[in-house]
Amino acid sequence: MNVNPSNLIYHDLVGLPAKVEFSSDPTQIGLEGMVVDETKNMLVLSTKRGYKKVSKKNALFTFYIPQPVTVDGTKIAYHPAERLKRIQRRKK
């Protein structure tokens, strides 16, 4: 299945370029980089200044696939496998 704006939140985000549009931590707003790791609650971005961890629940992200797609972090605040299970349950 190809990644598109309607199904982005159900895919693995590692390898996608991303930008933090909003965060409860003002020092993280504007961070840009490649997603190199993802946990249940965090995205790790490889930026020009090193690796930066960003909490998913308190942030708004833009992913580039190649068009920009903005995602509320609360919608992706699960393990990647858990997000896939949620879409499969919804289809039944």
Image (tube, rainbow, N blue to C red):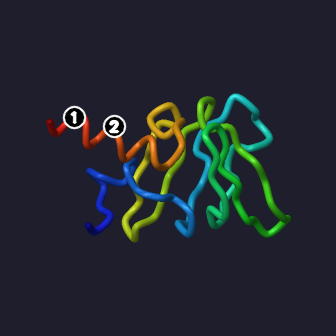
The residue where tag 1 is placed is: 90
Mark 2 Cα shell of 10 Å, populated few (<14), some (14-19), many (≥20): few
Question: How many angstroms separate mark 1 from mark 2 (CA)?
Answer: 6 Å
| Above or below: residue 92 compared with residue 4 | above
> Label 2 amino acid?
Arg
| Above or below: residue 89 compared with residue 4 | above
The residue where tag 2 is placed is: 86
Residue located 37% across and 65% down the image: 67
Classify the position of the C terminus by image quarter.
top left
Residue located 32% across and 64% down the image: 3
Residue 40 is left or right of residue 16, and the answer is right
Residue 57 percent coordinates (x, y) = 59, 30
Give the residue at the far left of this rendering: 92
> Label 1 amino acid?
Arg
Question: Which SS class for mark 2?
Answer: helix
Asked whether the residues under the numbered discs 1 and 2 touch, taking CB atoms below 8 Å apart as contact, a structural biologist would say yes
